[in-house]
Image (spheres, rainbow, N blue to C red):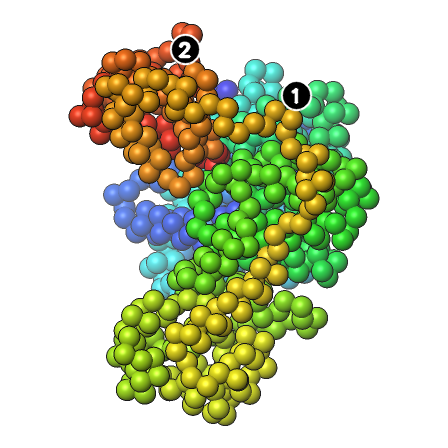
Amino acid sequence: MRATEANLLNFVRGSPQFVIPIYQRTCSWAERECRQLWDDILRTGSNDAISAHFVGPIVYIESAVFSVTASSPLLVIDGQQRLATISLLIEALARQLREAEPVDGFSANKLRHYYLLNPLEDGERAFKLLLTQTDKDTLLALVQQKPVPKEHSVHLKQNFEFFEHQIANLNNNDLTAVCKGLAKLVIVDISLSRDHDNPQLIFESMNSTGRDLTQADLIRNYILMGLEPPHQTRLYEDHWRPMEVEFGQEAYSQHFDSFIRHYLTLKTGEVPNVREVYDAFKAHARKSAGAAAAVDALVSDIHEFAGHYCAMALGKEPDRELAAAFQDLRELKVDVAYPLLLELYDDYRRKVLPRQDLLCAVRLVEAYVFRRAVCNIPTNSLNKIFATFGRALKKDRYLESVQAHLLLLQSYRSFPRDEDFKRALKVRDLYKFPRRTYLLRRLENHGRKERVSVDEYTIEHIMPQNENLSAKWRADLGSDWRRIHETWLHTLGNLTLTGYNPQYSDRPFVEKRDMEGGFHHSPLWLNKGLVAVLEWNEAAIQERADRLAARAAEVWRYPSLPQESLKVYRPAQEKAGDYGLKDHPHLASGPMRPVFEALQKEVLALDPCVTEEFLKHYVAYKAEGNFVDVVGSATRLKLTLNMPYPDLVDPRRIARDVTNIGHLGNGDVEAGICSLRELPYVMVLVRQAFEYQLDKAEGTG
């Protein structure tokens, strides 16, 4: 590796051509980065005391396509964003200057011939910078003053227009400052030796001054960079480029990292940490790819599943009913379910899972997640549930196995039953519920062939929100009107949709019902039952809530499977109540009994998802997995915390590392408690293990 400081314009002028390899990401700088560069150039050019402004490195290797001569193109490993953005700025400046030359060397003709074009070359070699795909055609059109292509690079066009606008608003002094600022830009010129340097390792370590590399950027380069150029080109053109096109320019940058994380979860059964998707991919690729044919198969598989993801997550499903189901999932934000959904959709495309069964399975996933949200069940276990769901599938009895697995989920993972769902739905504050619009839309459109767009309506409180209710409202509600208002205001029975919210205002119920545009004339199903209501009081609110909750149980259905069928899926070893407190005598009686009871109460109070299980040798407390296990003795409770010892914050140093020491329970940390006064500090340690397991389940730890 050779690294030297260089003036950017001299470096560009003295280099024959810069080529961005096909495996590099497209230009991603937006106005924020362009504005920062613009401000730096103006500031530098306006101040004679500033001799230079550093803009970052340009890292490149000599191209293997041509012989290594003075005119060989340079393959840019890092610096594409800077080179492309400076090129746009220079072209915008040239268009403004025309024949003028405010600073020596800064006329339109010189700017283009020094920094944008190679006037003595033909074809693509006539351009200083060749980007990839859509970026390439857009930049070449701009530097030739031609209209951009129909399928142009959004970022390049917007960035060019930004610079055009900034330059057009400058006075002569500021225009001179821009020229001087450009002339002061400095880079580190880093040339790599093909024989001695590893471009992939260098690429991974780059952290540009603009936008950090995404996990997708790193993955694409990891796959393609080490291949021979013809192999690179074939894989990119056959698979990677079609994926980018299918996602679209904006969606690719926003969604591809998420897709890869879901893909890896499906393939490995483990949820990668959101910051370590690239490392997880490398581990997966090393297992599944070796020879060139294996690399091809891996990329082809990613391409296929990317198409599945676009259909479900980006609204590209052609089947109308399936598209509606996927849209509902997107509105519900059920991202954690995509590992399972990718497998279901893949089997549907392979004719393993019938279309109607796929639709039923998707609706079951929707119902499961929504019922849990209504019942306020913590979401921290959902990642793990859907990551391992595929292991329970019986593909000769596909839909039945999906239903059975959902029905057999236990404890905090369980599918809320109708009575629990309806009870929670009727009493919780739905006005502040993040999914309230989704809820009302699904209730309204259930059974409809012509769906109503609820975006055209607003939420209406039938009993008004105003705390100072009118005399008429107080009379209708009765002497206990204040309690009724506080209890039922934001609940299901009192909420509806309307296009006449301002007209309704705080009018009495009968006026809202009978006025022009009132409930009596509403085309919405949600308002049909209001026509026959004579007065709006607590009984009317509860009656309507019962009716809507019953409809909700039909919309978000509980799985239905005969007990005979369900028995087949029950684990053979499933036995309840084999062990209990009686099997742990030091916990059941003696001096440690009150200490254990206090600890037990505190641990179970950490979160509703925490469960307790009495095993033969210890008592286990679980969130996603065991986070603390308790063993009793006559004078002490021994706690095993399930987290890495180095991660534990323990200023009193009461815990010890038992990583390589035989012990009961799960985990690498052992702590003890002998008295109630030690409980608050011990709970600090227990909470750390609890949070570690939740973060691990979510893939964020």
Query: Which residue is located at x 64 percent, y 21 percent?
Result: 286
Q: From the viewer's perspective, is residue 422 above or below residue 653?
A: below
Q: In x, y percent, where is residue 328?
A: 60, 58
User: Does dot 1 land on a helix, a strand or a loop?
Assistant: helix
Q: From the viewer's perspective, is residue 285 above or below residue 138?
A: above
Is residue 678 left or right of 400 when viewed as pictured? left
Query: Which residue is located at x 40 percent, y 48 percent?
Result: 37
Q: Earlier in the sequence, mark 2 or mark 1?
A: 1
Q: Nearer the viewer, mark 2 or mark 1?
A: 2
Q: Dot 1, how many residues are within 10 Å of its Cα: few (below 14), some (14-19), or many (20+)? A: few
Query: Which residue is located at x 74 percent, y 20 percent?
Result: 291
Is residue 320 left or right of 6 when viewed as pictured? right
Furthest residue to the right?
A: 351
Q: Which mark is residue 645?
A: none
Q: CA distance from mark 2 to mark 1?
A: 33 Å
User: Does dot 2 land on a helix, a strand or a loop?
Assistant: loop
Write down the quadrant of residue 541 in the picture. Answer: bottom left
Q: Which residue is mark 2?
A: 663
Is residue 220 left or right of 174 when viewed as pictured? right
Q: In x, y percent, where is residue 580?
A: 43, 25
Query: Which residue is located at x 38 percent, y 18 percent?
Result: 584
Amino acid on which disc 2 is placed: His
Write down the quadrant of residue 685 in the picture. Answer: top left
Amino acid on which disc 1 is placed: Lys
Q: In x, y percent, where is residue 202?
A: 51, 25
Q: Which residue is mark 1?
A: 287
Q: Dot 2, how many residues are within 10 Å of its Cα: few (below 14), some (14-19), or many (20+)? A: few
Q: From the viewer's perspective, is residue 187 above or below residue 181?
A: above
Q: From the viewer's perspective, is residue 466 above or below residue 252?
A: below
- In the image, 99 versus 11, the foreground residue is 11
